[in-house]
Image: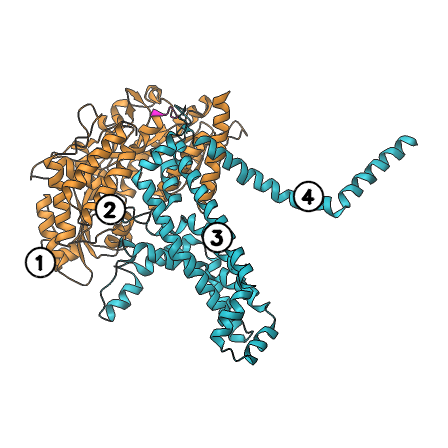
Amino acid sequence: MEEIDTSVNKKRSFFRFWNQPKHAAYLFMAPSIIILLFFMVIPLIGTLGLSFFNINIFFTGTKFVGLDNFVQFFHDQRAINSMWHTVYFTLLETPTQVIVGTVAAAALSRTTLFNRFSRSVFYVPVICSLTTSGIIFSMLLDPNIGWIPYVLHQFGMSTPQFFRDATLAMPSIAVMTVWKNFGVTMTIMLTAIQAISPSLYESAEMDGANKKQQFFHVTIPQIIPSLGFCVMTNLIGSMQVFDQIYVTTAGGPEFKTESAVQYIYSRGFSAPYQLGYASAVATILFVIIAVLSVSSNLYMSHKEKQMR
Amino acid sequence: MRHGLMKKLGVVAAIAAAGVSLAACGSSKSSSSSSSNKTTTITFWNGFTSTDGDVLKQIVKDYNKTNKDHVKVKMDIMTWDNFNQKLPTGITANKAPDFVAMNYGDMASYVANGTMKDMGDFYKQSGVDKSNFETTARNLGVINGKTYFVPMQVQGMYLYWNKKLFKKAGLNPNNPPKTWAELATDAKKISKLGNNTQGFAMPKDGSAIMYNLLQDNGAKLLNGSEKKSALNSAATKKSFDYLQQLIYKDGVGPKNISGAEADNLMLAGSLGLYINGPWLNSGLKKNNIDYGISTLVQAKQGDQKAILDGVGFGIPTSTSDSKTKAIYSFVKYWNTTKVGKKWSLENKCAPYLKSVASNKDIKADKLVSTMYKQIGYAKPYYPGNKNMSNITTNVINPSIEKVLAGNNTTSVMKSASKQVDSTLSGN
């Protein structure tokens, strides 16, 4: 009898322990932590480990080379160029998307039938895959069979080569990405804008502020946290750009659109299958993204404090 | 111990990176074997995604139904791009299929890394007549004296021309160009037809055309020992200048176009002349394009130079001996006259089995017999060189792009030569 009592007590204390909110929280977090551990932390450590080795994808002829792969990066013009292309894409895409998303959100913030319809329409590209969007844009912008060059030609304009032109290719990819993703930014900003108290606008109006002044002096300061979130997530996403480039230009013309991730991929997963070197470039990219994210986060927090 | 840990770390990192980069590329299917009623199931990966894939499916289906060796082939067809991405990680993670059909250009690096089985004993099997295989086709799969691949298909680059556009441009539709110079003359005439009509297309990833052009002009990619680049030559410059003049200066075709885009132009009937492999035939027929096919143009009339390429069956080292026996059964079936004839006639492919080549139906087929003519004198390009795939992707294709974009051909050539040297030295 006593034994049974002890076992029941143990069970009770076990459930009591995990029922406490501060302990239960860990249970709720556990699935995410496990997923993060297995799909982010361990591969990250694995990548860092591989970057110190001369190793190919077949794991033959493996040799410890210390920091050689990192040194090689600074002598590899194509790798450095791919980093610059990534930064160029980020500078084109991130501000454009945040601005377009915010303006669209502000314009569609009032709940009317038209606005609700427009929000749904602007969100449609988000549910398409980047690969599909890439194929659609490749066809639309193709100088020989594309609809957009055809229309421009009908108006007597010269037909730009878009994805085939070294200067136009990256801006074209950035425009396509903005079209594809600005629905997400718009939705986040819309939620933030709709949460602003109407009394703030009423006060501003009483003080004689026009719509433009209300937007810059009421709306923007109130949505700074959401704006910061959008800037940071877009920044991280843009620095990892791959799919749309892979589908539309494959890094061309003349590697002018080759992004860092694409370069990592081509080094590691196609001939010459240099997994160690690819890992070193991936590690460098990781550090750059981490520095950029932390800096942008600190800047936005500072701005938020300033505005308030 | 350390190697084991590295391998585990590597597999995790490789799979994670592949997951990040290629989220859209579908799932990797592992090889499997099931044993019911002593049936051996063998998994087979290849990249025949076009109409040739339908013929292949039919052949596999027939084999599965009729073979008496209790073998079942389970096939996974994917794009060649996807294939080349999945196979290396599959091999490393022990998830490779039991056998594959692979392009000859890609084989050497797999063999160099010890991932492919020696298939030399295939020809020693009863019912396999080694002498029935064309020697050049058989030798495509020989690396360092060992047979790693058995032919599945042989091919070359052929000249396609649109007869309708030839007529419109005032050219004889039954007289295609025989030399590169004639090709340039005809292409210029066709490109003047307007309405987005192109004379000739040189894809920026058209290394197969480039290698043929270099060879025809007497240029060499590598030196005799294949340890140094031999690209820096007047013949290479001549080849680069020819392409630049044709596309960039004379504008007879689109600049910066991929092979797939060039294929679409030919299939849409707006391209006069094009060089490509046999796989274009089915699409042209389907689109009712009035076209002709001939052996590849030459530097001088009467020359007979061409590069032999193809696809071969290979077996990863992870495949067990019992499954290897089952694979041989299928490969043996593939290399029968009946199957060879079906594959050649339905896909418009040159035969490599003598018994197929001598068949009256094959001889009567104008397209197939034209292609077979070229197979007679075509030779493989640096066979068994493990660096060819890397050189093609990272040196030759980018150089083609630069030449077509109007860059100085001498500096492109010198830079390409330097890069080839760097690749060969392993840097």
Per the image, the residue denoted by label 4 is: A26
x then y, percent, for residue B113: 37, 25
Q: Which mark is residue B289?
A: none
Foreground residue, A132 or B102?
A: A132
Residue displayed at 69% across by 43% down: A27
Q: Does label 2 lie on the same chain as label 3?
A: no
Q: Residues within 10 Å of mark 3 (few under 14, many from 20)?
A: some
Q: Amino acid at mark 1?
A: Gly
Q: Nearer the viewer's eye, disc 4 or disc 1?
A: 4
Q: Quadrant of the C terminus of chain B?
A: top left
Rendered view: A35 above or below B251: above
Rendered view: A63 above or below B51: above
x then y, percent, for residue B136: 22, 27
Q: Residues within 10 Å of mark 2 (few under 14, many from 20)?
A: many
Q: Chain of mark 1?
A: B
Q: Chain of mark 2?
A: B
Per the image, the residue denoted by label 1 is: B170
Per the image, the residue denoted by label 3 is: A296
Colour chosen for chain A: cyan
Q: Does label 1 lie on the same chain as label 3?
A: no
For numbered disc 2, what is the local secondary structure?
loop
Outermost residue, front direction? Answer: A306
